[in-house]
C-alpha cells in the first residue's frame, strides 16, 4: 500500500536565508508536518510531500489533484483580498478542493484566502500588525472530537490582515486579544489558522529585520515583538499534533 501524499501551495518567495537554513518554506512545513523516521519504513509506504509555487503561477494539474490526500496553503507577502492573477487562480483551485472534500490547512495568508474562496471576507486588521508570540484561546467544544487540545496555546504571529467575515457555515474555533478569528473550520475537511505553527523564533527575527528594511513596521513594533519572543515559547509540539491530526486524520491525545 502506498503512503499518503500531500502538497504545499507556496504563496511566498523564499528568502536566501530561509533557503539556506531551512530548505525554503517548503522545508519548514515538511519539518512540522512530515512523518519522522521515514527511513525505517518500507519505500512504498513512505509519505510523499510535493510543492507548487503558486506565487509563481505553478499549480497542480487537474488530473493530479486526486493524487493528494491533503493540501497546505502557506503565508504570503501579498494580500488575500488582492486581485493578482495567481491569487484568482488559487481561489478557483480552493473551490475545487472544497467540492472534492479534500483536506486543506491554511496558514496566515492561507487562512485568509480560504475564507475568501469559501465566501467570506478579508482585509486590513483594525488593530494593525500582530507580531510576536501570542496566546490564543481555543474552544475545544467546537473542534472535531479527534482534535482535543488545550484551551490556550501560544503561537507565532506575523500579519496585518485578517478574516473580517466568516464564510457561511464556517465556525470560529479560536480567538485572541487582537484577532477575533484566529482559527476556523469549514465542515470536517478545511481548517484555517492566522498564526504560524511552522515558524521558529529564528524565522520571526529574520522576518522582523526584513519588515524593518522595507519600512513596513516601526522599530518600536519590532522591539515589542522581540520582547514577546524572549518572554514566551510558542507551543510548537502541541501545534504539530493539532495540524498533523487535522491533516492526516490522526487522533490527538
Image (spheres, rainbow, N blue to C red):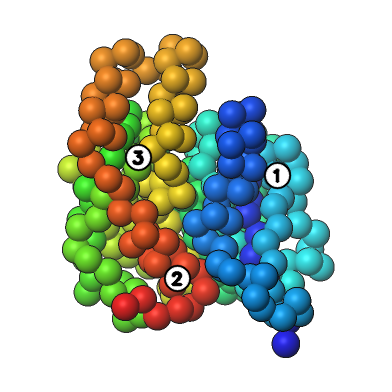
| Horizontal relation, residue 89 to residue 221: left or right | right
Q: Secondary structure at mark 3?
A: strand
Q: CA distance from mark 1 to mark 2?
A: 23 Å
Residue under label 3, please give it.
157
Residue at the (76%, 46%) spot, across then down: 58
Q: Is residue 168 something one can see in this rendering?
A: no
**Quarter of the image holding residue 25?**
top right
Residue that protrudes farthest toward the bottom in the picture: 1
| Horizontal relation, residue 125 to residue 103: left or right | left
In the rendered image, the quadrant that contains the N terminus is bottom right
The relative height of residue 172 versus residue 159 in the rendered view (above or below) is below
Crowding at dot 3, Cα within 10 Å, few <14 / some 14-19 / many 20+, comes out as: many
Disc on the earlier residue, 3 or 2: 3
Q: Give me the disc on residue 137.
A: none
Disc on the earlier residue, 1 or 2: 1
Residue at the (62%, 48%) spot, across then down: 26
The relative height of residue 143 versus residue 229 in the rendered view (above or below) is below
Q: CA distance from mark 3 to mark 2?
A: 20 Å
Q: Nearer the viewer, residue 109 or 14?
A: 14
Residue under label 1, please give it.
53
In the rendered image, the quadrant that contains the C terminus is bottom left
Residue under label 2, please give it.
246
Residue that protrudes farthest toward the front in the picture: 40
Residue at the (58%, 41%) spot, across then down: 22
Residue at the (22%, 47%) spot, across then down: 135
Q: Nearer the viewer, residue 233 or 140?
A: 233
Q: Where in the figure is residue 167, as x and y percent of width and height?
A: 41, 58
Q: CA distance from mark 1 to mark 3?
A: 23 Å
Q: Where in the figure is residue 108, as x and y percent of width and height?
A: 44, 45
Amino acid at each position: 500500500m502506498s503512503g499518503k501524499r500531500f502538497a504545499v501551495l507556496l504563496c511566498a518567495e523564499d528568502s536566501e536565508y530561509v533557503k539556506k537554513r531551512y530548505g525554503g518554506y517548503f522545508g519548514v512545513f515538511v519539518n512540522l508536518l512530515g512523518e519522522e523516521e521515514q527511513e525505517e519504513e518500507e519505500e512504498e509506504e513512505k509519505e510523499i510531500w510535493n510543492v507548487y509555487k503558486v506565487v509563481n503561477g505553478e499549480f497542480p494539474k487537474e488530473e493530479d489533484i486526486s493524487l493528494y490526500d491533503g493540501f497546505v496553503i502557506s503565508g504570503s507577502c501579498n494580500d488575500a483580498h488582492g486581485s493578482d492573477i495567481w491569487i484568482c487562480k488559487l481561489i478557483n483551485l480552493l473551490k475545487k478542493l472544497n467540492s472534492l472534500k479534500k483536506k486543506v490547512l491554511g496558514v496566515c495568508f492561507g487562512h485568509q484566502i480560504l475564507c475568501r474562496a469559501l465566501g467570506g471576507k478579508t482585509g486590513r486588521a483594525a488593530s494593525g500588525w500582530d507580531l510576536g508570540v501570542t496566546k490564543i484561546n481555543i474552544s475545544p467544544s467546537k473542534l472535531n472530537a479527534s482534535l482535543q487540545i488545550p484551551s490556550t496555546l501560544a503561537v507565532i504571529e506575523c500579519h496585518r490582515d485578517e478574516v473580517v467575515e466568516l464564510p457561511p457555515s464556517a465556525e470560529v474555533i479560536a480567538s485572541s486579544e487582537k484577532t477575533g478569528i484566529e482559527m476556523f473550520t469549514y465542515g470536517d475537511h478545511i481548517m484555517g489558522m492566522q498564526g504560524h505553527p511552522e515558524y521558529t523564533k529564528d524565522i520571526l527575527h529574520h522576518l522582523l529585520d526584513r519588515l524593518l528594511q522595507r519600512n513596513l513596521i516601526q522599530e518600536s513594533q519590532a522591539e515589542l515583538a522581540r520582547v514577546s519572543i524572549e518572554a514566551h515559547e510558542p507551543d510548537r509540539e502541541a501545534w504539530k499534533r493539532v495540524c498533523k491530526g487535522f491533516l492526516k486524520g490522526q487522533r490527538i491525545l
